Amino acid sequence: MIMMTILTMIFLIISNILMLISMLISKKSFLDREKCSPFECGFDPKAIARIPFSLHFFLITMIFLIFDVEIALIFPIIPTFKMVNFFSWFKITFFFLIILLLGLYHEWNQNMLNWSN
């Protein structure tokens, strides 16, 4: 119990010393107007908030997020290859990749992959 109290005190002392050091040596840039203003993805924060937004940019972002999540779902399939029955692993992987390719084909048919718009 005494050891736990000593370790807690050491932790509190070291953390307080580190916070004090970081406050002393940090750059005082809180007076800089540019650094204090919010960055809104290239939009001027002082302008009108209701400017038109590109729907194509939004759809490209959604496509990226969908494919990013699908890639995150594909990664665990690889290590499970040796742990499960090959036939069931092949069926699930094949089904998942078919759904992925059908989604890609649909986006291609809708001209969503045309980046020149």
Image (cartoon, rainbow, N blue to C red):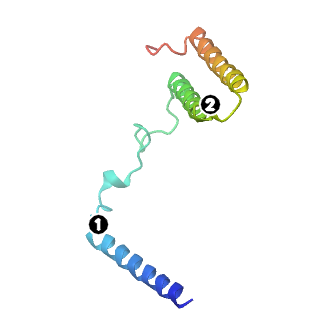
Q: Going 55% across and 30% down the picture, which residue do you hit?
A: 71
Q: Is residue 46 depicted above or below 91 in this figure?
A: below
Q: Is residue 57 depicted above or below 37 in this figure?
A: above
Residue 88 placement (x, y as % from top left): 73, 25
In the picture, the disc for residue 102 is none
Residue 49 placement (x, y as % from top left): 50, 39
Q: Is residue 15 depicted above or below 46 in this figure?
A: below
Viewed as shown, does residue 83 lie left or right of 9?
right
**Disc 2 residue type (three-letter):** Phe
Q: Is residue 99 depicted above or below 78 in this figure?
A: above
In the picture, the disc for residue 26 is 1
Secondary element type, mark 1: loop
Q: Going 30% across and 61% down the picture, which residue do you hit?
A: 31
Q: Going 45% across and 16% down the picture, which residue do you hit?
A: 115
Judging depth in this view, the residue of 13 and 58 nearest the camera is 13
Viewed as shown, does residue 86 lie left or right of 29?
right
Which quadrant would residue 99 be assigned to in this image? top right
Q: Going 29% across and 61% down the picture, which residue do you hit?
A: 29
Which residue does the numbered mark 2 point to in the structure image?
81
Judging depth in this view, the residue of 98 and 30 nearest the camera is 98
Residue 5 placement (x, y as % from top left): 52, 87
Viewed as shown, does residue 65 lie left or right of 9?
right
**Disc 1 residue type (three-letter):** Ser
Give the mark toward the camera: 2 or 1.
Answer: 2
Secondary element type, mark 2: helix
Q: Earlier in the sequence, mark 2 or mark 1?
A: 1
Judging depth in this view, the residue of 16 and 11 nearest the camera is 11
Local crowd at mark 1 within 10 Å, few (<14), some, or many (≥20)? Answer: few
